[in-house]
Amino acid sequence: MSNQRDLIIIGSGPAGLTSAIYAARAQLAPLIIEGEPSSTSDQPGGQLMLTTEVENYPGFVEGIMGPELMDIFRQQAQRFGAEFQPGKVSSILNSSSPFELEISGSSSILRAKSLIIATGAKPLMLGIDREAELLGHGVSTCATCDGFFFRDMEIAVVGGGDSALEEALFLTRFAKKVHLVHRRNELRASKIMQKRALENEKIIPHWNSVVSKIYGDASLTGVELSDTESHNTTHLSIQGLFVAIGHIPNTEIFRDKIEMDETGYIVTRNGTQTNIPGIFAAGDVQDRVYRQAITSAGSGCMAAIDAERWIAERE
Ligand code: NAP
């Protein structure tokens, strides 16, 4: 595998893999740094690896499982010659082309004329005591990964968006009761998901409520809920707490190099260009509005076309 490339794509979710398909077909022989297999926030395939059925990706009349969809994307990129390397980029060493990249766990430096950043986003946490310690011991951000452990138990999901409702509905397959804790009295999720969730007898909504305390030593035993209006508190005895309150972009390693907004999303202009000529960004890492698999894939396509044109203009 060559250390000198035309294009390196960082990330292998819908944006990274779509840019890989387009770049490979444009003869750029892209290398995709695909993430770390052991991680839940930077795993190859991105967030769809942690979802169940994707019903709104065009082309799949009956829906498709997230991991299967990503496997198809990957095979399609490989068919045109895209190459994959497991691992995470730990830093971009310089600010002009050719770019030099350090990869965690590897001593060699990779070089590329152009880069596409498609590192996606990771789950937001509540930021309260015991949450981090009990992650993996009752606290989770992934129903498809951990739902099975909560067979016949009582659990809660925090959040009012599509992710929270999708998690809650999935968890009804295992759990006895799923408490849905939302900080307002109105859900943010799409109408179809709201209808499904609120009609499910196992899902019990707690409106205007936040989790204010988490209890448990070796594993979760319960939470305290606070009413956002009356400030009254109640105790819920639960064995599982699924946090589904949104995401933050995976941009820590680009800080001080690539322009970002106040919440860490990469700022793009004229399509997918960042502030550094030759570096492009696609997918959730630069999109705080739409954040869909299809829009990520679309912006991945745009980034590959932008990178191809940028390289061609300089040669
Ligand atoms: P989201 O739409 O941003 O929803 C986050 C939810 O968490 C909101 O209800 C928010 O409350 C709540 N929240 C945020 N911070 C909180 C905190 N600190 N404490 C308590 N609650 C908090 O995020 P998402 O559900 O992950 O969805 C992200 C995007 O992916 C959306 O565009 C969504 O449509 C899409 N998505 C689509 C599907 C699908 O189509 N099947 C599935 C999953 C996700 P407020 O409502 O009060 O702000």
Image (cartoon, rainbow, N blue to C red):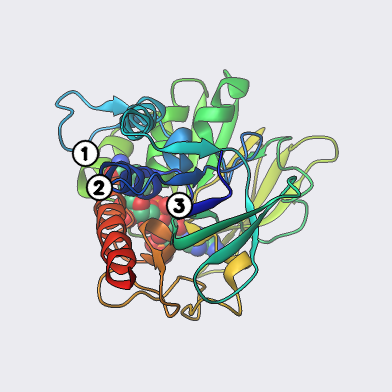
Instruction: Identify residue type, mark 1.
Output: Asn
- The residue under label 3 is 9
Quick check: 202 above or below 260?
Answer: above
Residue at x 36%, y 64% (from the top left corner):
287
Checking the image for residue 56, the label placed there is: 1
Q: Are marks 3 and 1 in contact (CB under 8 Å)?
A: no
**Which amino acid type corresponds to the residue marked 3 in the rendered image?**
Ile
For the residues carrying marks 2 and 1, which lies nearer the camera in this image? 2
The residue sitting at 57% across, 20% down in the picture is 148
Residue 258, numbered circle? none
Q: Earlier in the sequence, mark 2 or mark 1?
A: 1
Disc 3 versus disc 1: nearer the observer: 3
Label 2: element kind = helix
Secondary structure found at label 3: strand
Give x and y (percent) for residue 176.
52, 23
Looking at the image, residue 30 sits to the left or right of residue 309; the answer is right
Binning the other alpha carbons within 10 Å of mark 3 as few (below 14), some (14 to 19) or many (20 upward) gives many
287 to the left or right of 39: left
Residue type at the position of mark 2? Ile
Q: Residue at x 40, y 48 (%)?
A: 16
Q: Looking at mark 1, is its residue's CB closer than 8 Å to ligand 1?
A: yes
Which residue does the numbered mark 2 point to in the structure image? 294
Residue 23 locus on image (x, y percent) = 31, 48
